[in-house]
Amino acid sequence: MYSWIDGLEAAPPNADSRQLRMALSAFMTGVCLVTTVGEDGKREGMTINSFSSVSLQPPLVLWSIRDDARSADAFLGSGRFAIHVLAEEHQELALHFARPAPDKFEKYVSEFEAGLHGCPRLRGALATFECSTYSRHKEGDHTILIGRVERFSSCAAAPLVAHAGRLGPVDEIADALRKARETAS
Ligand SMILES: Cc1cc2nc3c(=O)[nH]c(=O)nc-3n(C[C@H](O)[C@H](O)[C@H](O)COP(=O)(O)O)c2cc1C
């Protein structure tokens, strides 16, 4: 398990964005990898946890991207993306894709194949949603990307989860919470 925040602090209503981020991280989520490919063939990928389902008819999903992310122009301009729900064995990959780098894929050549519209598709994801961009909504310092699911697949395996700045398997996150509670009492 990887931890990047030590714990949640009490914060006033006018809390700064770091405190707000910590409070928001109390909401446990799955962890996803989103990928795209530009017109020039350049592949981009980033770790996200803002994924959510939106609609079944038509099939829509969403995620949001920070506007000053290195790869924002690629994701906002390409018109396509693939979202992969990560399994617990993808922890190292999730951390790798959460750091800026010119070519994040070269370290994981054998893990990816070309998917729909050429977007990199990760082998072994719990679920994959291959999307065309349906709409974009700029809100604050992020843009919400809504994707129309054109193809999807799923399989049964244990998920990677994020909670309170920790990233890891569900049982490791639960253990860490139990230990923190015991230490506090
Ligand atoms: C668990 C986790 C969830 C994240 N969720 C998002 C997200 O939903 N949207 C976003 O823009 N960045 C998110 N990030 C941060 C990006 O992964 C990070 O900024 C990455 O460097 C972006 O890729 P780029 O630098 O190649 O543009 C998340 C990071 C982690 C560790």
Image (cartoon, grey):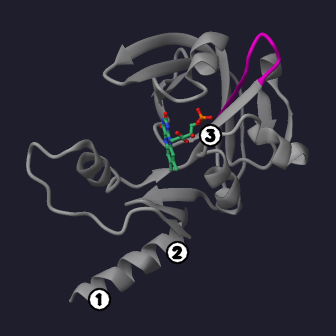
Could you tell which of marks 1 and 2 lies nearer the N-terminus? Answer: 2
Is residue 36 on the magenta stretch?
yes
Q: Quadrant of the N terminus?
A: bottom right
Q: Position of residue 25 (x, y in %)?
A: 35, 53
Task: Please state which amino acid type lies under the numbered disc 3.
Answer: Pro
Q: Secondary structure at mark 3?
A: loop
Instruction: Classify residue 134 by image quadrant.
Output: top right
| Residue nearest the observer in this picture, 33 or 14 | 14
Residue range highlighted in magenta: 33-42
Q: Are dots 1 and 2 in contact, CB under 8 Å?
A: no
Asked if the beta carbon under badge 2 is closer than 8 A to the nearest atom of ligand 1, the reply is: no
Asked if the beta carbon under badge 3 is closer than 8 A to the nearest atom of ligand 1, the reply is: yes
The residue at the far left in this view is 13
Foreground mark, 1 or 2? 1
Residue at x-position 79% and y-position 31%? 120
Q: Position of residue 110 (x, y in %)?
A: 91, 46
Is residue 21 on the magenta stretch?
no
Residue 28 versus residue 7 in the image, above or below: above
Residue at numbered disc 2: 172
Residue at numbered disc 1: 183
Residue 15 versus residue 157 in the image, above or below: above
For residue 100, the mark is: 3
Residue at x-position 52% and y-position 23%? 56
Q: Secondary structure at mark 1?
A: helix
